[in-house]
Amino acid sequence: MRAAIGRYVVLPSEEALSAVTLWVAASHIQPALQHAPRLAVVGPTKGCGKSRVLDVLHETVHQPMMTVNTSPAVVFRVIGKNPPTLLVDEADTIFGPKAGDKEDLRGLLNAGHQRNRPAWRISGPEHKPTAFPTFAMAALAGIGDLPDTIMDRAVVLRMQKRKPGERIAPFRSRYSVPELNALRDRLTAWLAPLRSTAGSLIPRMPVEDRAADTWEPLVIVADLAGGHWPSRARAACLAMTRNEVVQDEQTTLKTRLLRDIRRVFEQQGDTGALRSHDLLAALVQDAEAPWAEYGTKGLNAYHLANLLRDFGISPANHRFENGRQAKAYARNQFLDAWARYCPGPAPAASAASDAAPARRAQGGPPTRPIGTPPVGPPGGPAGPRRTR
């Protein structure tokens, strides 16, 4: 299975390839699991292979249910005692800023990470309170990160575009589907009789708390497989959870930067634009902020532009009242990011500064902005050849 997945998609790392393989296998022992890990397949742009990952999952997981868009009512009704494996493509259209109110669906996906978290609804002609099961494994693919509460319950694949020379086999239904279905059937034949064994295992985990809840099903499958899989699974768990910690730290740092920039603009009377040099000086002079120690010599213009790029914010030439031009940041570029990432008592915008921001001297308008003896799988304990 690992070799087959690696033929059709280029994953971010060998650990990610192992994680996807174990996630697929874990879907075949869902009745024995206490937690149903999510698989978040995210990338910065289109063309990173996210949908192809779901194509492969559709032919290999237990009872797949593929959807591009869905509603909580549908999901409530398809999840039962033998739940499907939910595969949701274009998840950014469900949870993105223009998707509207999807809190019910987000709550369902959060609750379904753990067994015995039903959703109660009034249902039927007699309008009786009814408990709908929510427990089911789910893979969600989309551009950009999913909501934090989902990412926190997920094995995260951060996909990237293929480099020149990185080649994959074309996915064609006439030969790819039979091959993958045959592997799926072998997994089912091996794991179905071991569900009671899997349910009694208490694996040694290299992480704690929610990360341990999410990765335990994958480690259980690895311990059942034996051979090199137990060590491979734990190595993948450590590497990928550490990577997400780094991502969280970066996100937290960027949010701090937005808050600090808002404070600087407020101190300057909510002026229409600030010179890059002046903004940097104000940030670095704050003794309680991390900017003086950022990098090797403190925050500089390159660092600032790089940290703000993900928000669609960039400096441009502006002409100020004295007639001089300078690289500067316009206040109106930050309004959307402030509202989304650090909501709170923002300074009131003066009519003059918002109605007539500093004129741009050139360039276009600013962009808007994862105990018991092992039972080997069919074919023996030898691991598959690494295929990339």
Image (spheres, grey):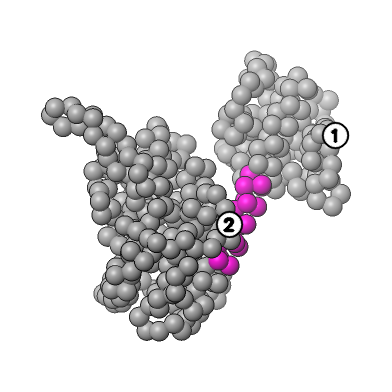
Numbered disc 2: secondary structure = loop
x, y percentage for residue 83? Answer: 28, 53
**Is 243 in the magenta?**
yes
Compared with residue 318, is residue 18 higher up or lower down, i.e. above or below?
Answer: below
Labels in figure, total: 2
**Is 193 in the magenta?**
no
Tell me which segment is drawn in magenta: 234-251
Q: Earlier in the sequence, mark 2 or mark 1?
A: 2
Residue positioned 29% across, 33% down in the render = 120
Callout 1 amino acid: Ala
Residue projecting furthest to the left: 125
Is 330 on the left-hand or right-hand side of 91? right
x, y percentage for residue 227? Answer: 49, 79
Residue positioned 57% across, 37% down in the render = 368
333, 83: nearer the viewer: 83
Q: Please tell me how crowded label 1 is: few (under 14), some (14-19), or many (20+) other residues with Cα within 10 Å.
A: few
145, 19: nearer the viewer: 19
Quick check: can you spot residue 155? no
Q: Which residue does the numbered mark 2 point to in the structure image?
A: 207
Q: Which residue does the numbered mark 1 point to in the structure image?
A: 287
Is 308 on the left-hand or right-hand side of 372? right
Residue positioned 43% across, 60% down in the render = 217
Compared with residue 249, is residue 157 higher up or lower down, i.e. above or below?
Answer: below
State the separation of the CA atoms marked 2 and 1.
35 Å
